[in-house]
Image (tube, rainbow, N blue to C red):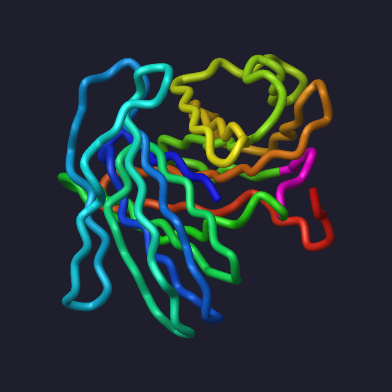
Amino acid sequence: MFTEGYRSSATTSRLYMYSTQNGTATIFSLQMLHTNSNESIQLSKGENKFDLPNSVLTKDGKERKEISVSLQKEDIFEFENVNVSVIKSDNKVLVMSYPTEAGHFDSYMMTIYGINQYKTDYSIVVPDDFTSYISVTFTSGSADGFRIDQKRVLVYKLYRKQVAGTTYLTMACNITAGSHTINHESNIHFGLWIYGDRVYDGYGFPAGIAFNHNP
């Protein structure tokens, strides 16, 4: 699973991971590309806290942090997401994102679904009277291949993370209110989330979930 948090009013979010079965989950975190940020990341389970290991550099010089935890049924873990995180689990987990409140903007909670539930195209409706964004996650294809209403997407941010030979990429951009269709010129599977804010309000939701796709 993969998520990227971006709002005009907040730059971090809390991720909640709920285990429905026993197993193991590994959390990988990568600071934003081309920055020198080295903020600590801490995983919590109730009153117990686990610090991520010290940063290590990948071959391309990017910071990498990761931690593995044993999961018991109905365990709940939480941690602050800084730009990019990848969660890999050997069993079923539910992941929720809860962006940090800032100023006069409210938070919201949003489901982060797995890559096995990505679709190739989406039809969405963006609410009026919000500053709204989309976040796109994919594992193949080029970022400049995405289209909104058949027009090329102008990417605001682009992140990438390689885990076990798979490269995950995520990007964010603004989107206007109203009905839209979103797809990729190469017909790839990708995840899509819509979120936005205004004074004393905020919202976020997945654009759609496939229930029969197994990449």
Q: Residue at x 62, y 42 (%)?
A: 192
Q: Residue at x 75, y 39 (%)?
A: 189
Please give left or right for residue 136 compared with residue 152 in the image: left
Within the image, what quadrant is residue 42 found in? bottom left
Q: Percent position (x, y) of residue 173? A: 50, 26
Q: Residue at x 59, y 57 (%)?
A: 113
Q: Percent position (x, y) of residue 120? A: 79, 39
Q: Nearer the viewer, residue 37 or 110?
A: 37
Within the image, what quadrant is residue 11 found in? top left
Asked if the stretch drawn in magenta spans residue 26, the answer is no
Within the image, what quadrant is residue 49 found in? bottom left
Please give left or right for residue 48 compared with residue 189 in the image: left
Q: Percent position (x, y) of residue 112? A: 53, 56
Asked if the stretch drawn in magenta spans residue 118, the answer is yes
Q: Residue at x 48, y 23 (%)?
A: 158
Residue bounds of the magenta highlight:
117-123
Q: Is residue 128 above or below residue 67?
A: above
